[in-house]
Amino acid sequence: MQYKALVTSFVALAALNACAGSSLNPGLQAPRTNSQANLNSLAARRNQPVESLVERTRMEKHLAALSGKTQVGPEGLIPERGSVQGRALTRAYLSKALEGIGYKAEPHAYRTNGTNMTARLMADVPTDEYIVVGAHMDSVKNAGADDNASGTVAVLEIATVLKQLPNRKVNVLFAWFDEEEIGLIGSRYLAKELRKQGMKISSMHNIDMLGWDGDKDRTIELAQPDGILWDYYNMVNKTHGLNIPFDRTNTGQSDHESFHNEGFHSICISEEYTSGDMTPHYHRKGDTFETINLDYLTSSTRLVAAVVGDLSLKVPAPANIQRTPNDRFPSRKRELHGSYDEHLH
């Protein structure tokens, strides 16, 4: 479908809760847990903070499937996400998972062999304002457990739990970007299209590599936070009692830059890439399921869920925000590739 029509439908269908059937390969079944049945029981959880609904076990099963650890059905193993086939299998898996929790999966085909996956969560009262929560779903030609199945799973989990948050006043667009590894291509196309269509995006939250915590201090890197986002993350971290250490940086070369360049306030959430507490398996064959710190991934996902949840409720930002320029903080260049066929070290 043309993405122009998709964007138009975001506003026109604001009051609808869409849930479409799937024509995907029935063998590509998203893993189900007993807890997913409980997602239909909103009344029992309405008074819980949204981050408390994040489930490590559910994330672990998605991560195992997306990093080639477990089969997801007949011929459904996803051993890598750097080929046309591997990325197609990933989109099929995400589509099935999204439909299983009540979303309509909305592909954004922007060029030959380039397709992002999106889904929308409409506010309880119709509005034209959006928050974007995204991660790149591709990898180099490896299992890519940390880079970036970890981010892919975090966004999927946030989409799962935010459906249970009542009284949302802002729409949320979830996005899984294609072709990040070869130059942020998928996110650039999507950000440009949303800008062209006049989408009112108040903030964009990009999750890129969130599975390594070598020193076990739980620190999260917050890179290039625009506008109120640095202060807002700190506020929510305190008010929700999460108390996670932050490392602020000026590191780019990830999908948040595509949105920043289109004038949208954005931020990148990751492990401590800039200071060096990052996976030693970056862009290597060793980036496998077994290297992921699932407790760290879970606690970090809870933070982003809490932040996006409060933003969707329009919880006010703290007073007296200090807008310190990002260029006053350290940065470290990320590695992009000319093609997926470049040598994998």
Image (cartoon, helix red, strand yellow):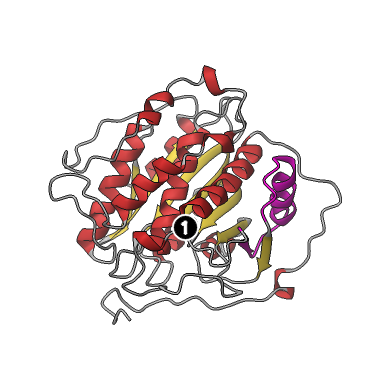
Direction right: furthest residue: 320
Magenta stretch holds residue 243: yes
Q: Quadrant of residue 222?
A: bottom right
Which span of residues is magenta-colored?
Answer: 218-244
On the image, the x and y values in percent for residue 18 come to 38, 28
What residue do we see at 40% from left, 63% from top? 291
On the image, the x and y values in percent for residue 270 come to 55, 61
Screen quadrant of the C terminus: bottom left
On the image, the x and y values in percent for residue 167 come to 61, 25
Of 78 and 201, the residue lying toward us: 78
Magenta stretch holds residue 224: yes
Q: Is residue 193 visible?
A: no
What residue do we see at 38% from left, 33% from top? 103
On the image, the x and y values in percent for residue 121 come to 48, 35
What residue do we see at 24% from left, 61% from top? 79
Looking at the image, is 78 positioned above or below residue 141? above
Mark 1 Cα shell of 10 Å, populated few (<14), some (14-19), many (≥20): some
Q: Is residue 62 left or right of residue 302?
A: left
Looking at the image, is 152 positioned above or below residue 125? below
Looking at the image, is 128 positioned above or below residue 252? above
Q: Is residue 211 visible?
A: yes
